Amino acid sequence: MSETSSQRVVIVGAGPAGIRAAAALVEAGLHPVVIDEGHCAGGQIYRRPPAGFTRTAEQLYGPEAPKARALHMLFDRLAKEGRLTHCAASSVIAAQEGRLHVLGEGRVQMIGYDRLILATGASDRVAPVPGWQNAGVYSLGAAQIALKAQGVALGRRIVLMGSGPLLTLVGAQLVKAGADVAAVLDTSPWRQQMRGAVWGLAARPLVALRGMVLRARLGGRYHADVTLERIEADEQGVAAMRWRDPGGREHRTPCDMIGMGWHLRAETHLADLVGCTFTYDEQWRQWLPRTDQMGRAGNGVYLAGDGVRLLGADGAEIAGRLAAAACLADLGIPASATGVDLRKLARLERFARGLAYAFPWPAAMARALPDEAVVCRCENVTAGAVRQSVDFGGGEANRVKSLSRVGMGRCQGRYCQLAAVELVAAQAGCAADAVGRFRGQAPVRPAPVGAFLRDG
């Protein structure tokens, strides 16, 4: 066995980026290990339903159905032929000194690596709204998972709110499935959306046109440039959404379910644990791992997909191939040419920047939260408690975290960190990047204590 063929290459994530990276490594003669939280490969965007599910791929993925089928078939074939090892329904909960702590089947096992490709994707970027801690409030991604995986809507009368492509997509998917969507509330002004379209969305005109078609399907349900006031609830959970239109008129929309999200938040906890450096992206208003254009992060670690660049499924596929090519080059193994992929990635970057401008993170809304509003749902930490912690300990993210417990719950700040940082920055009178970010902690996912116990 050659030295290069004995290299242990592990990929975390089996979405579009992970699948393309695995295929490129297999083609070069390596046998990668692919660890993924799903039972089947596909990631969130191409999530597969359980066996016996009656909805077709076209119903689940729309015009992306051919891409989804191709990726599913590619990965399944490689796994069936024994050309890769697939650790399904498994979560990497910690990383240390070339070893991953992997939770699966009720126990934790160690998987060593010489090279590591992180294709961890992204999750919903949410912003607190007064009342969002009540039962019946979900992320847009959760609503989409329920629809794709189980064919159900999470409520009888639904309000969606936030901004970004996912807001329109989930709304259109729910309407098409027959759900009662009462309103789709977008905090982004029409004028800013149009400027973003001129600036960056023209880089992918067909995708932009597809988004406009989906928006048209929403009809009068869609409202732009809204101000979100509060979520009303009773003993059963969500009861109504109060909001104001651009003219300042107040509306009350009865509902029993709310889905919320402002585009995406890169999943970076593992990148933090393996020692990646981070830089603050002012346009996305979040800390992102730093890599070269191929995805190299240093020390044998490579990043691909939405966990490093929020470029969507097409960008993730390209980034997966590039990360694999970088890994192969560093191992001295010839890889396919990357020039075309790099040019495509640059075009997708322009498109993504246009999206970021057109559908911005609502920083002002987060900073203006009333003191009694809950910021951290896991620990029930209010905006007032965060502001008070700044007064006691200064405007540094981890000091505020230790004093207030914001971000210490089971989600580890995935839902509250970005809003908490805006609150800290406003209270301290500084920019958001000066506040810093919450340090990653293991385990990055909740794990039962029994999973760490070993026989003998």
Image (cartoon, helix red, strand yellow):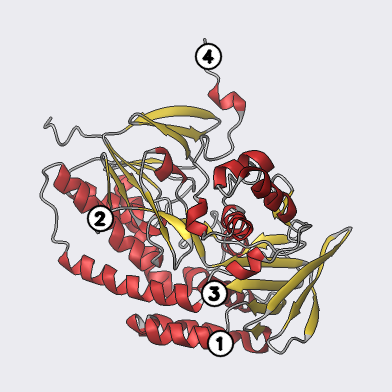
Kindly give the residue lying farthest to the top in the view shown.
456
Q: Secondary structure at mark 1?
A: helix
Query: What is the spatial separation of the Cα atoms under label 1 and label 2, in whole angstroms?
Result: 35 Å
- Residue type pointed to by label 1: Trp
- Residue type pointed to by label 3: Leu
Tell me: 253 left or right of 281.
Answer: right
The residue to which callout 4 is attached is 455
Give me the disc on residue 169. Answer: 3
| Residues at marks 4 and 1 touching, judged by CB atoms closer than 8 Å | no
The answer to whether one can see residue 349 in this image is yes
* The N terminus sits in image quarter: top left
Residue at image location 53% in from the left, 35% down from the top = 443
Give me the disc on residue 190. Answer: 1
Give me the disc on residue 104. Answer: none
The residue to which callout 2 is attached is 292
Q: Residues within 10 Å of mark 4 (few under 14, many from 20)?
A: few
Given this view, does label 2 or label 4 mark the residue nearer the observer? 2
Position above or below: 213 against 316 = below
